[in-house]
Amino acid sequence: MRKELTQTRQKKKKLMEKRALIDEQLELLSLREEELENEEVVIVFREANITLEELMEQFKQLKQEKKEKTVYEKNMEV
């Protein structure tokens, strides 16, 4: 019984070590994926000749339009 318990604990320890390594590798891969996605966005903006300021202005405008639409719909319900 003692031998089986020891073996089970050793297997568990090895698996936990592998899990920690996998978690670390996944974290690094996730960070790299995010960096690559950001680079891709920048490339698309450059190809389309869109600056960050223009993008933010479009975003603000869309947000404002959505807000106005929501207010309008609420007023129509009343």
Image: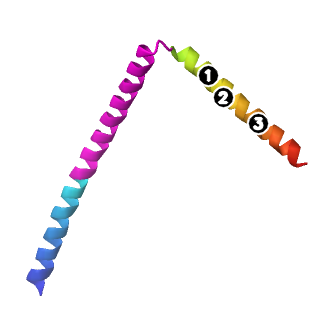
The location of residue 16, given as percent across then percent down, is 22, 61
Q: At label 3, which amino acid type do we have?
A: Lys
The location of residue 41, given as percent across then percent down, is 42, 25
Under circle 2, the secondary element is helix
Q: Which mark is residue 49?
A: none
Distance from disc 3 to disc 2, alpha carbons, whole Å, reads 10 Å
Q: Which mark is residue 58?
A: 1
**Few, some or many residues within 10 Å of mark 3 (<14, 14–19, 20+):** few
Q: At label 1, which amino acid type do we have?
A: Gln
Horizontally, residue 67 falls left or right of residue 9, namely: right
Q: At label 2, which amino acid type do we have?
A: Leu
> Looking at the image, which is closer to me, 32 or 18?
32
Q: Give the magenta-colored segment's residue range.
A: 21-50
User: In this view, which residue lies farthest toward the right?
Assistant: 78
- Give the residue at mark 3: 69
User: In this view, which residue lies farthest toward the left?
Assistant: 3
> Looking at the image, which is closer to me, 41 or 24?
41
**Few, some or many residues within 10 Å of mark 1 (<14, 14–19, 20+):** few
Q: Say if mark 2 contacts mark 1, CB within 8 Å.
A: yes
Residue at point 66% right, 28% down? 62
Q: Earlier in the sequence, mark 3 or mark 2?
A: 2
Residue 6 vs 49, above or below: the answer is below
Residue at point 67% right, 31% down? 63
Horizontally, residue 57 falls left or right of residue 11, namely: right
